[in-house]
Amino acid sequence: MPKVVPHVAVGGNFIDGVFHTHAPVEDGLDETRLWTRGGTFSGTAGVSYLVTKRAAVTVDAFYTSLWVQRSPGAPRTNDGLFNVRALLSYTFR
């Protein structure tokens, strides 16, 4: 089936980020400092279908595990991210 092209990919990121809130709440301002540090890994797999020589439809499934510790004494839990996305592409050359 030359019109069907499968693909897979893996990725990794190291994140060292900080977010300062400055949000109005009922009793003043929330000035919370949220931070994260660590690595994430992700994987995606999908298939492209070549409709013509220039047009293709692609569908991908993506997953990454996101480990979260909500407070210093809380256990780490996995709030993984999973999504499915589609793309219609056309090549002009």
Image: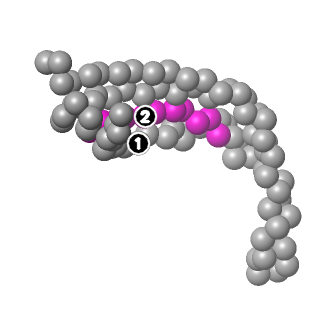
Residue 65: x and y, percent? 54, 32
In-image side of 51 versus 63 (left or right):
left
Q: In the rendered view of the protein, which quadrant contains the C terminus?
A: top left
Q: In the rendered view of the protein, which quadrant contains the N terminus?
A: top left
As drawn, the residue found furthest toward the top would be 1
- Residue at 78% of width from left, 35% of height from top? 16
Residue 8: x and y, percent? 39, 21
Q: Which mark is residue 18?
A: none
Mark 1 Cα-neighbour bin, 10 Å: few <14, some 14–19, many ≥20: few
- Residue at 20% of width from left, 24% of height from top? 4
| Sequence-first tag of 2 and 1 | 2
- Residue at 80% of width from left, 62% of height from top? 21
As drawn, the residue found furthest toward the left would be 1
Toward which corner of the image does residue 12 lie, by quadrant? top right
| Residue, disc 2 | 62
Nearer to us in this view, 5 or 31: 5
The reply to whether the C-beta atoms of the residues labelled 2 and 1 are less than 8 Å apart is: yes
Nearer to us in this view, 44 or 4: 4
Toward which corner of the image does residue 3 lie, by quadrant? top left
| Residue, disc 1 | 83
Dominant secondary structure of the residues highlighted in magenta in the image: strand
Nearer to us in this view, 59 or 77: 59
Residue range of the region highlighted in magenta in the rendering: 57-68
Residue 41: x and y, percent? 57, 25
